[in-house]
Image: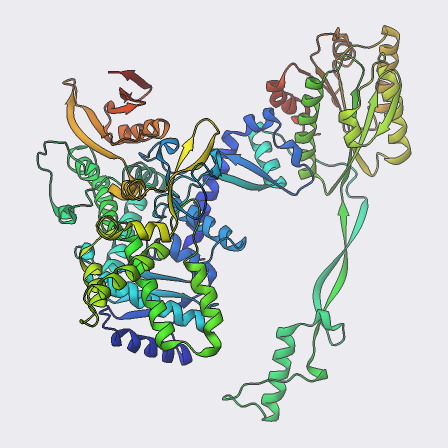
């Protein structure tokens, strides 16, 4: 349902405020939807026309249950597209809608201006629909179960694209000394696949490249949107009678949890911190801080953002700490509040989207066309059980034995799957 | 239908497949049996998410926020969710606790064990009355007001009277606009069943044996409940003497005396005669013992009760013999010899937990 009546007036008002602050966004088309529709759209990653797959049903179940038990509620969902699409929950109060609209304009500005989004397809809504119809066609032709089963296997390695060079989306394989990191591309070109399988693999890779920047800039993007909803509402849009509702909603978005960092909170605080620091640098120059954060939102991603601007004072003020598993007590415990430790752990958890580095090194291992993968160990072991399960899925694609070299507790190991048996041996 | 419904349906059927795959494990484990009183059962399922290369969670740790000294515990070992520390960009680990209704579980059990459907006897002699809200009246309590109908009536009246203003669409119902939901009483035939469990609680029956009985009884309940409108359950324990107890005492009581199986059969027969006429009731009798009876003479007595008095009144008599170190296990042989051709008497040896699965099939596989 499109906006009408007082909500469309409200949209025009919020849009003007956003313009007034020099936000430069794709125009936003708002749709009002109910809880069920919201959970559905969210399960499809924002694209109601997406291809059919059971995991969307699983995510839907998870979201619907979470909402029913009051654990979570999605107020808004926004799609990186030109024009930008934003879904608002029908049941939001008027004040909530105000906040959410301002938040959405923040996201839209970020999508349009942040450089990591440059290579994303701004007609993704159409493209997703096209993907879905292709996959449906294959399902009609080869059987739904066959196609879905194939997708299951591909998804096991969907995280393994090269996010640091988005331009490789359309490139082909070249020899690389350290091995190939884009496993999807590798299988696309080298695995013994049917044309329809290659097409599905291509589709899934395309979608991964589309979503990758959102994963790379979660903190920056949410922080930016939160910064702007807070600024627009408190400086312009809020009526006196709405202050308490606004504060209630805003504080629940930026609440802190002991077991994780809240990207909304860390993001908004860091932007505010940068603004303040730059304003203090040259008190004679007005708006230096504001200029700075606009520039930051253009060029950085979460890793460079934290690497460049995280300070010791900031960590202390926001009570950041590192926790680790203590095998003696069997619990997770706070292990350090040192700035260097916090920063290192944060950056590590964001590096490569939090996914271990896996490279294809040889596709003629032992001279028998067996695939040799290498885990670039950076201090943390793999979950070996999961790794074997992935090897089994890769075997389905490669149809020859798969080997993975990794370190387990400091010992170099070769994990192998030959189609029937999992083997683990020291090297 | 919304698009997500079909994906959700696929997910559900994957789950069902998983439950079925693991049904044998659930049956023998007995971990579900503690939840008998609920209409839904939580079944723990192995993850069905897609495997990915991930870090070893125990080595990974993460960054959190809040107060606390070094060494402060922030989560217990298994409570930590995978991916939570990664700035929230991976969805939380979906470890699955799936709610399955008893009916669904029974259906799966039926399919998995290929249990035939039971044809109830008694042809629905007992009628039960249900209230069904199927009509609308002009009078009634406010709590049963039918809002939509009332609104429609009021709207009709206002339009007819020319007082309806589309720009200010306020409708005020008056008394004669009001409509109320009302019910009709319907009568439905019911098939009732009673299950009478008997167990030997003499010294030779240990905890392990009782656990087997409990698990087996749970699945028998589940299946029979899916086949009848209502089920009553009665429990009899016996050593040298028999008495009727409630469910809890049934599994907890332990006596040290000898064993006279006939005492239980007499009591059981008495209960059937007094309360469950075979015209109206489908009667199921189960007896679990280690097969050690006091004397051959008592066994003879048991066989007579069964043959001349009990078997003609029950749908099914099942004897399950659990293995015990002390028992001679003679009773089941006597039963088998004596009732070789009897249709509604079933015996089964349950040597271990693993045997529960086949034993259920033996008991219920006749479709009685």
Q: Is residue B175 left or right of residue A234?
A: right
User: Where residue B121 sits: x, y (%)?
Assistant: 76, 36
Task: Return the residue nearer the eye: B87 or B184.
Answer: B87
User: Where residue B301 sits: x, y (%)?
Assistant: 88, 13
Task: Return the residue nearer the eye: A42 or A407.
Answer: A407
Q: Is residue B362 left or right of residue A143?
A: right
User: Where residue A239 sits: x, y (%)?
Assistant: 43, 78
Q: Quadrant of residue A424?
A: top left
Task: Return the residue nearer the eye: A103 or A88.
Answer: A103
Q: Is residue B288 above or below residue B32?
A: above
| One can see residue B48 in this view | no
| One can see residue A293 in this view | yes
Look at 84% across and 13% down and name the residue there.
B259
Look at 32% across and 56% down and name the residue there.
A267
Of all residues shown, which one is farthest toward the bottom?
B162
Task: Return the residue nearer the eye: A30 or A231.
Answer: A231
């Amino acid at each position: 349902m499109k906006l009408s009546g007082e909500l469309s007036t409200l949209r025009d008002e919020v849009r003007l405020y956003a313009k007034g602050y020099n936000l430069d966004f794709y125009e936003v088309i708002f749709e009002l939807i109910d809880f069920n529709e919201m959970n559905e759209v969210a399960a499809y990653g924002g694209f109601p026309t997406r291809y059919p797959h059971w995991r969307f049903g699983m995510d839907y179940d998870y979201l619907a249950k979470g909402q029913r038990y009051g654990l979570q509620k999605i107020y808004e969902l926004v799609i990186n597209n030109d024009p930008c699409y934003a879904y608002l929950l029908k049941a939001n109060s008027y004040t909530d809608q105000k906040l959410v609209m301002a938040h959405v304009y923040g996201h839209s500005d970020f999508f349009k201006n942040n450089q990591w989004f440059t290579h994303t397809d701004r007609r993704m809504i159409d493209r997703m629909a096209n993907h879905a119809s292709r996959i449906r066609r294959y399902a009609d032709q080869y059987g739904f179960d066959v196609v879905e089963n194939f997708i299951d296997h591909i998804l096991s390695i969907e995280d393994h694209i090269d996010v640091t060079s988005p331009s490789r989306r359309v490139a082909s394989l070249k020899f690389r000394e350290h091995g190939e990191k884009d496993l999807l591309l590798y299988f696309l070109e080298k695995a013994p696949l049917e044309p329809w399988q290659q097409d599905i693999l291509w589709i899934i890779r395309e979608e991964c490249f589309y979503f990758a920047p959102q994963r790379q800039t979660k903190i920056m993007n949410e922080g930016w949107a939160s910064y702007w909803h807070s600024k627009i509402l408190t400086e312009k849009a809020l009526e006196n009678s709405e202050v308490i509702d606004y504060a209630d909603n805003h504080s629940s978005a930026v609440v802190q949890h002991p077991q994780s960092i809240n990207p909304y909170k860390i993001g908004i605080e860091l932007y505010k911190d940068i603004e303040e620091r730059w304003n203090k640098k040259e008190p004679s120059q007005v708006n230096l801080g504001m200029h700075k954060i606009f520039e930051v939102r253009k060029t950085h991603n979460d890793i460079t953002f934290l690497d460049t601007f995280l300070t010791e004072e900031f960590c202390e003020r926001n009570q950041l700490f590192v926790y680790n598993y203590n095998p003696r007590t069997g619990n997770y415990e706070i292990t350090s509040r040192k700035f260097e430790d916090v920063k290192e752990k944060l950056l590590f958890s964001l590096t490569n989207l939090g996914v271990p580095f896996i490279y294809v090194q040889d596709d003629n291992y032992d001279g028998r066309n067996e695939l040799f993968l290498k885990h670039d160990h950076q201090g943390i072991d793999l979950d070996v059980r999961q790794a074997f399960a992935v090897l089994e899925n890769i075997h389905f694609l490669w149809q020859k034995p798969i080997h993975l070299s990794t370190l387990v507790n400091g010992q170099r190991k070769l994990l192998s799957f030959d189609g029937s048996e999992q083997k683990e041996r020291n090297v | 239908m919304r698009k997500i419904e079909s994906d959700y349906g696929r997910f559900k059927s994957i789950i069902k497949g998983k439950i079925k795959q693991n049904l044998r494990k659930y049956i023998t484990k007995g971990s579900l049996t503690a939840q008998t009183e609920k209409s839904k059962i939580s079944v723990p399922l192995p993850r069905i998410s897609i495997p990915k290369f991930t870090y070893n969670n125990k080595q990974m740790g993460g960054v959190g926020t809040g107060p606390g000294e070094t060494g402060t515990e922030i989560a217990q070992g298994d409570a930590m969710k995978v991916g939570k520390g990664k700035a929230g960009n991976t969805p939380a680990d979906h470890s699955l606790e799936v709610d399955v209704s008893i009916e669904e579980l029974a259906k799966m059990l039926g399919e998995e064990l290929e249990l035939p459907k039971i044809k109830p006897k008694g042809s629905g002699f007992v009628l039960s009355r249900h209230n069904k809200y199927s009509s609308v009246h002009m009078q009634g309590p406010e709590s049963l007001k039918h809002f939509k109908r009332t609104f429609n009536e009021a709207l009709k009246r206002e339009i007819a009277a020319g007082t309806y203003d589309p720009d200010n669409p306020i409708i005020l119902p008056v008394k004669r606009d009001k409509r109320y939901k009302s019910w009709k009483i319907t009568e439905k035939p019911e098939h009732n069943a009673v299950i009478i469990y008997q167990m030997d609680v003499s010294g030779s029956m240990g905890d392990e044996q009782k656990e087997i009985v409990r698990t087996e009884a749970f699945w028998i309940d589940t299946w029979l409940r899916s086949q009848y409108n209502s089920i009553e359950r009665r429990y009899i324990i016996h050593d040298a003497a028999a008495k009727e107890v409630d469910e809890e005492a049934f599994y907890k009581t332990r006596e040290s005396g000898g064993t006279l199986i006939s005492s239980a059969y007499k009591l059981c027969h008495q209960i059937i005669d007094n309360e469950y006429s075979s015209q109206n009731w489908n009667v199921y009798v189960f007896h679990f013992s280690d097969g050690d009876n006091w004397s051959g003479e008592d066994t003879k007595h048991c066989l007579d009760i069964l043959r001349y008095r009990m078997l003609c009144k029950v749908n099914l008599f099942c004897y399950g013999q659990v293995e015990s170190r002390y028992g001679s296990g003679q009773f089941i042989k006597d039963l088998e010899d004596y009732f070789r051709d009897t249709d509604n008497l079933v015996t089964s040896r349950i040597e271990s937990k693993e045997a529960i699965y086949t034993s259920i099939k033996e008991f219920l596989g006749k479709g009685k």
